C-alpha cells in the first residue's frame, strides 16, 4: 500500500486531442508529457513521481465537463490543467468548483476569470490588444477597423477592448458582426468590409469558420489594396493550414513565436521538435506555452509549499515565478491569478512568423478588484 508521502502525484490534463482543435490540443498533450517526464527524470516532486492523467475533450464542451468531473471527483487529481476555447474552460470549471480543485487554464483568452481556484497562464487583452493596436495604427496610419467575429464571449470582449484602444488613438470600429462557429458564407461581410473603407480587419472568427472567411477576404483583394489583417491568436500551427498568400502580412500578438531568439526558448523548441516531430508544433496560440508555464509555476508553488496541501499551494502560486520559459520569464501578479509576460507582435512572412516588435514585459491588469 502506498503511503501518501511516496504515492504518485496525480496531474490531470484535459485538451482537444480530437475534433476541430486537435492540431492545437495534441501540442498541449505533448508539452504536458514532456514537462512531466522532465520533472520525473529529476526525481519527481517532493520525492514523489508525477502521473499524467490525460483526457480528450474532443473540442466538445459537454465532453470536457464529463472529463473534468471524472478527473476531479472520481480520480481526485491533485491539480487540473487544460482547455482551449473559453467555453471549454467554463465547462471544466463546473466540476472544479464543485470539487474545490485547483485549476490552471493555459490559453490566451478574454480575461475576467477571477475565481479563487483558477489561475490563468496565457495572455489577456491588456497584453494583446492594448499593446498591438496603438503600435499598428502608428505604423500603418490606419484608423478604421472591421470586426468579423465568432459568437462567443472571447470575441465580444476582444472587440470591446479594441474599441477602447482604437478610440484612444483616434480610430473607430466601422463594422462588427457575430457568426456561429461553423458559419461558412462570408460573401456579404467581405462586401461590407470592402465598401465601408475598412483599413484593418480585426478577425476573431475561429475554426472551422475561419478557412472560408480568409479565402473570401483574400479573393476580394483587401490586403493587395493595402488593407491590414490582424488575428491575435494566430501562430505557427494555424499558419501552416492556409495558403501563404491568404495570411501573408497578417499581424498577431502573443507571448512567444518560434523565431524568438533567446537561448532557453530555442533549446525548448529544439527538444520539443526532436521528441514530437510532425504537424502539432509548439506554439503560443495553441496554449502549449501556457501549459508549459502552468506546470512549471505549479511545480515552483508545490516546492515552496513543501506539500500538496491545496491552500498552501494556492498561496505560493499567487506569487510564483519561473526564471526561464518560452518567450522569457513569467510570474504571477500577486492577487490577480494571471501572469506578467514578455509579449511580441508577430507578422506572417513567407509561411512563418517574424517578430515585428518585442514589446517587453507587460502586466495582465486582470482581477484588479481581487479574486472572488
Image (spheres, rainbow, N blue to C red):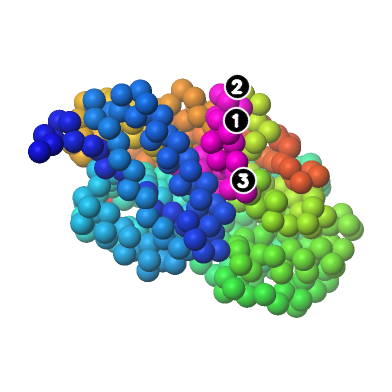
* Of the image marks 1 and 3, the number of the one nearer the N terminus: 1
Cα distance in 3D space between marks 1 and 3: 13 Å
> Which numbered dot is residue 263?
2
- Residues 101 and 155: in front is 101
Crowd rating for badge 3 (residues with CA inside 10 Å; few <14, some 14–19, many 20+): few
Pointer 3: what residue? 278
**SS of the residue under disc 2:** helix
Measured as percent of width and height from the top left, residue 292 is found at 46, 37
Measured as percent of width and height from the top left, residue 105 is found at 41, 48
**SS of the residue under disc 1:** helix
Name the quarter where the N terminus is drawn. Answer: top left
Cα distance in 3D space between marks 1 and 2: 11 Å
* Of the image marks 1 and 2, the number of the one nearer the N terminus: 2
Q: Is residue 227 magenta?
A: no
Who's the residue at 62% across and 54% down the image? 162
Looking at the image, do the residues carrying marks 3 and 2 touch, with CB atoms under 8 Å apart? no
Measured as percent of width and height from the top left, residue 173 is found at 69, 62
| Viewer-side label of 3, 2 | 3
Residue 227 appears left or right of 262: right
Measured as percent of width and height from the top left, residue 35 is found at 42, 34
**SS of the residue under disc 3:** loop
Crowd rating for badge 1 (residues with CA inside 10 Å; few <14, some 14–19, many 20+): few
200 relative to 104, above or below: below
Extent of the magenta region: 263-291
78 relative to 151, above or below: above
> Which numbered dot is residue 270?
1
Cα distance in 3D space between marks 3 and 2: 23 Å
Amino acid at each position: 500500500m502506498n503511503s501518501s508521502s511516496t504515492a504518485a502525484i496525480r496531474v490531470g490534463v484535459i485538451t482537444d486531442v480530437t475534433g476541430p482543435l486537435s492540431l492545437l490540443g495534441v501540442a498541449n498533450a505533448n508539452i504536458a508529457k514532456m514537462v512531466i517526464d522532465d520533472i520525473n527524470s529529476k526525481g519527481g516532486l517532493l520525492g514523489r513521481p508525477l502521473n499524467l492523467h490525460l483526457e480528450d475533450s474532443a473540442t466538445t464542451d459537454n465532453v470536457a465537463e464529463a472529463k473534468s468531473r471524472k478527473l476531479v471527483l472520481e480520480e481526485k487529481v491533485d491539480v487540473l490543467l487544460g482547455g482551449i476555447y473559453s467555453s471549454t474552460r467554463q465547462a471544466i470549471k463546473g466540476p472544479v468548483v464543485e470539487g474545490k480543485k485547483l485549476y490552471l487554464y493555459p490559453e490566451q483568452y478574454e480575461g475576467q476569470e477571477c475565481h479563487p481556484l483558477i489561475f490563468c497562464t496565457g495572455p489577456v487583452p491588456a497584453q494583446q490588444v492594448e499593446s498591438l493596436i496603438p503600435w499598428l495604427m502608428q505604423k500603418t496610419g490606419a484608423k478604421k477597423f472591421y470586426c468579423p467575429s465568432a459568437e462567443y464571449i472571447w470575441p465580444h470582449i476582444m472587440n470591446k477592448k479594441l474599441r477602447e484602444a482604437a478610440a484612444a488613438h483616434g480610430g473607430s470600429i466601422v463594422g462588427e458582426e457575430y457568426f456561429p462557429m461553423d458559419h461558412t458564407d462570408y460573401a456579404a461581410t467581405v462586401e461590407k468590409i470592402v465598401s465601408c473603407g475598412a483599413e484593418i480587419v480585426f478577425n476573431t472568427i475561429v475554426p472551422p469558420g475561419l478557412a472560408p472567411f480568409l479565402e473570401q477576404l483574400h479573393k476580394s483583394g483587401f490586403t493587395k489594396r493595402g488593407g491590414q489583417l490582424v488575428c491575435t491568436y494566430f501562430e505557427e500551427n494555424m499558419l501552416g493550414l492556409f495558403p501563404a498568400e491568404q495570411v501573408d502580412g497578417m499581424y498577431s500578438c502573443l507571448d512567444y513565436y518560434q523565431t524568438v531568439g533567446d537561448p532557453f526558448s530555442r533549446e525548448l523548441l529544439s527538444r520539443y521538435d526532436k521528441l514530437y516531430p510532425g504537424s502539432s508544433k509548439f506554439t503560443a496560440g495553441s496554449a502549449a506555452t501556457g501549459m508549459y508555464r502552468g506546470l512549471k509555476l505549479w511545480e515552483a508553488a508545490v516546492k515552496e509549499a513543501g506539500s500538496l496541501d491545496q491552500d498552501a499551494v494556492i498561496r505560493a502560486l499567487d506569487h510564483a515565478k519561473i526564471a526561464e520559459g518560452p518567450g522569457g520569464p513569467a510570474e504571477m501578479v500577486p492577487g490577480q491569478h494571471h501572469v506578467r509576460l514578455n509579449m511580441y507582435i508577430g507578422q506572417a512572412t513567407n509561411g512563418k512568423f517574424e517578430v515585428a516588435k518585442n514589446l517587453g514585459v507587460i502586466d495582465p491588469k486582470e482581477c484588479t478588484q481581487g479574486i472572488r
